[in-house]
Amino acid sequence: MAKPTDPYHAHVYFDADTLPVAQRLHQDLKGMLQNDSLPGLVLVGKMYDRGVGPHPKPQFEVQFLAAALPAIVPLFKASGLTSLVHPVTDDDLADHTTLAEWIGEPLPLDESVLDPPGHNKGLARFGEVDF
């Protein structure tokens, strides 16, 4: 069971057809972060126009605390975009696979670039930067 302060990431995927929806969600989330209307929202990353890290297509990252899960997951679902929601632990592979929740159609990730257990660089950058 997650503690309210446990760190989480979401990756919201888009393509040329869904770009306007992704831009709207990205803008909405940035607004919520700026006016502090979604408690536990920590960072809304930049929109990448290509795959980055293990992610095979354009995406943006959202960092938040577990306490925000009940408010933020419905936003991802309502968007209709594919999203990957996962905790940030010391096991990057498990975070992106067995501990992850896909919203929409799952995508194949490049697991070869994920950090080895005990060395998750996502923990160190949580709340600071995305990729």
Image: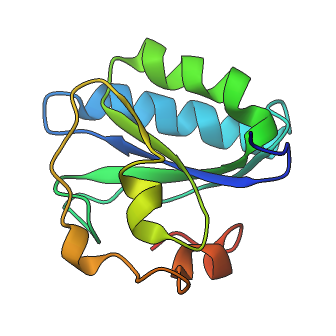
Q: Position of residue 84 (x, y in %)?
A: 40, 41
| Image quadrant where residue 13 sits | top left
Left or right, 80 with reference to 64: left
Q: Nearer the viewer, residue 16 or 8?
A: 8
Say which quadrant the N terminus sits in: top right
Left or right, 85 with reference to 16: right
Residue at the extreme top of the image, as rendered: 78
The residue under the point 41% across, 19% down is 79
Q: Nearer the viewer, residue 117 or 121?
A: 117
The residue under the point 14% across, 28% down is 17
> Up-down: is 51 above or below 112?
above
Count every numbered label the image shows and give the total.
0
| Image quadrant where residue 48 sits | bottom left
Q: Position of residue 24 (x, y in %)?
A: 45, 29
The residue under the point 60% across, 61% down is 88
Say which quadrant the C terminus sits in: bottom left
Left or right, 109 with reference to 99: left
Left or right, 73 with reference to 97: right
Q: Position of residue 73 (x, y in %)?
A: 57, 25
The residue under the point 64% across, 74% down is 123
Report the colour scheme.
Answer: rainbow
